[in-house]
Amino acid sequence: MAKKAKIRRIAILTAGGDCPGLNAVIRAVSKKAILDHDMEVIGIADGYDGLIHNRHRKLEFTDVSGILTRGGTILGTSNIANPYRYPVKKGKKIKYQDVSATVIKNIEKLKIECLVCVGGDGTMAIAHGLMNQGVRVIGIPKTIDNDLKGTDITFGFNSAVNIATEAIDRIHDTAQSHHRVMIIEVMGRKAGWIALYSGVAGGADLILLPEIPYDMDIVTQCVKMRHKKGKRFSIIAISEGAKPKGGKVTVRKLVTDGSEPVRLGGVGVSLGDKIENLTGIETRTVVLGHLQRGGSPIPADRILGTELGAKTIDFIIDKKFGCMVGVVKNQLLPIPLDVVAQGSRLVPLDHELIRAARSVGTCFGDCHSLVL
Ligand code: F6P
């Protein structure tokens, strides 16, 4: 059998919104590449932006040592720099250009034999495009939203759930003292994984997800009924992308240079105003926002990040390119990028956790809970 040509130089970039565990991944990829295979590892600055503008540096062992517990990413990131739709300012206007040819030229100049792209759906879609143009790529699934196709979990998700749950616990105390309705708005544009998991873990009375449009009557009746039965407070966990039945998502701002055309936000405040008006019960809203993305990763994400990073190097050695390292039933498998690039992984309506939550009386805003 012909001997496989040795891979000598790889590059790694982190793109899209940051999340806890990115440094654990960078560390695992780089250390294993250097220690086990004597590869050179190039760290690309600020996601795909560094490939467009040629900003990178060689990662030595010492650069990736001592970063396991650190939040953020030592490489920097960008959720604007899409080589297929790169915003360029022309006077006061922004024009979009396809600069993928520059990216490919820079990858060739750098003699990169495999590009490791750590990111969410946007990052994987770009990696898929580069793969179709002949670049050897491997993706690693990152996002607090946990909404990537082809993997049961993304790193960063459990750390975000931890942060949101801790916040709900704290809000519980003050809600009880003041007999208020308290709403906690968490991230999740199309998929409600964070609201579902933190809502269940924090014992939220109502959990409102993008996948289950809520009925305002049911929400207010649930709150009123709790008051009537002596529970003079209610906790509502809501995703930023949740919407009322027949209504639309709450848009805070239209964006021209971002990866998404709209910036969501405000659904918690507008729901709070409605509840207060309709029930007469004082209602307050807390928006967790980017708090969910910062800080040290919890052990589960340090472990997952290390496993994903190490497996990526195995795939590179086996020349399994054009895939993402997916977690499927506790196994790390190569998932074709064609599969990953097929939209978001939403919470299935028959998800076991939704069923379990309903059975303990949690209301999802679509029908009355059994226990109030
Ligand atoms: O990638 C996850 C996410 O946290 C979304 O839930 C959220 O809408 C978005 O990123 C916000 O990102 P940014 O404010 O950095 O553009």
Image (tube, rainbow, N blue to C red):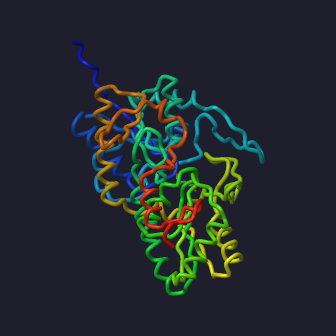
Could you tell me which residue is drawn at 37 percent across and 52 percent down? 23
In the picture, residue 300 is in which quadrant?
Answer: bottom left
Against 188, is 116 above or below? above
**Towards the viewer: 258 or 355:** 355
Q: Position of residue 128 (x, y in %)?
A: 50, 31
Q: Position of residue 206 (x, y in %)?
A: 53, 67
Instruction: Indicate the quadrant containing the N terminus: top left, top right, bottom left or bottom right.
Output: top left
Left or right side of 55 for 275: right
Could you tell me which residue is drawn at 29 percent across and 56 percent down? 66
Residue projecting furthest to the front:
370
In the picture, residue 41 is in which quadrant?
Answer: top left
Q: Quadrant of ligand 1?
A: bottom right
Residue projecting furthest to the right:
92
Could you tell me which residue is drawn at 35 percent across and 44 percent down? 59
In the picture, residue 137 is in which quadrant?
Answer: top left
Against 359, is 4 above or below? above
Q: Position of residue 248 (x, y in %)?
A: 70, 54
Against 187, is 224 above or below? below
Residue projecting furthest to the bottom:
177
Left or right side of 351 for 59: left
Q: How many marks?
A: 0
Q: Position of residue 2 (x, y in %)?
A: 24, 13
**Towards the viewer: 129 or 285:** 285
**Towards the viewer: 281 or 256:** 281
Left or right side of 296 for 168: right
Could you tell me which residue is drawn at 52 percent across and 62 percent down? 290
